[in-house]
Image (spheres, helix red, strand yellow):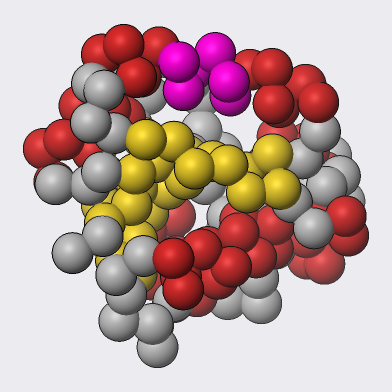
Amino acid sequence: MKVAVFPGSFDPITIGHVSLIRRALPLFDKIIIGIGVNTSKNKLFPLSQRVKWINEVFKDEDKVEVQEFDGLTVDFSRKIGARHIIRGLRNASDFDYEKTIAQLNHELNNEIETVFLMSRPRYSHISSTIVREIIRVKGDASSLVPKEVKLYDKGE
């Protein structure tokens, strides 16, 4: 079985993330959306909310599941039997950063390959960081996230 991990904070999941996952589905038997737990980062949305949103977005897709993990992505991948890590690239800066991470992951475990997918041009400007900034200043980010993500359920 070909299993891949698509790691990230998904704070929140964006339409760019969803596009990449849907495009990767034909390549793998299962995609684990791995929500990395990084206590040094200040998250806007609680982990439980992010898991709920992702499960809702992919509720009709048997090949997708969500798991949280702590530590290195390559260790998490090995632990769950994934041989691939999916990473999205929006631009040259993403490539430079992700190439370095992929090379380091290969040094740590040469049985796990990183698969890069280019973002569709219409999503290349979208990142969770930008979406969070829009939300923090009370802007409307609803066009940048899947309809299942109810950004303003927090009472704002």
**How many marks can you see?**
0
Q: Is residue 132 above or below residue 12?
A: above
Determine the residue positioned at 39% across, 41% down: 85
Q: Give the range drawn in magenta.
A: 98-103
State left or right for residue 118 relative to residue 36: right
Q: Residue furthest toward the bottom?
A: 60
Residue at screen point 88% across, 55% down: 121
Q: Give the x, y percent position of residue 146.
A: 65, 70
* x then y, percent, for residue 24: 51, 63
Q: Is residue 101 magenta?
A: yes
Residue extending furthest front? 110
Asked if residue 94 can be seen in this view, the reply is: yes
Whether residue 150 is visible, yes or no, is: no
The image quadrant that residue 77 belongs to is: top left
Tell me where residue 151 appears, x and y as whole percent.
65, 61
Position of 105 with respect to 18 (left or right) is left
What secondary structure prevails in the magenta region?
Answer: helix
- Given residues 67 and 104, the one toward you in this image is 104
Q: Is residue 89 left or right of residue 142?
A: left
Q: Quadrant of the C terminus?
A: bottom right
Q: In which quarter of the image is residue 99?
A: top right
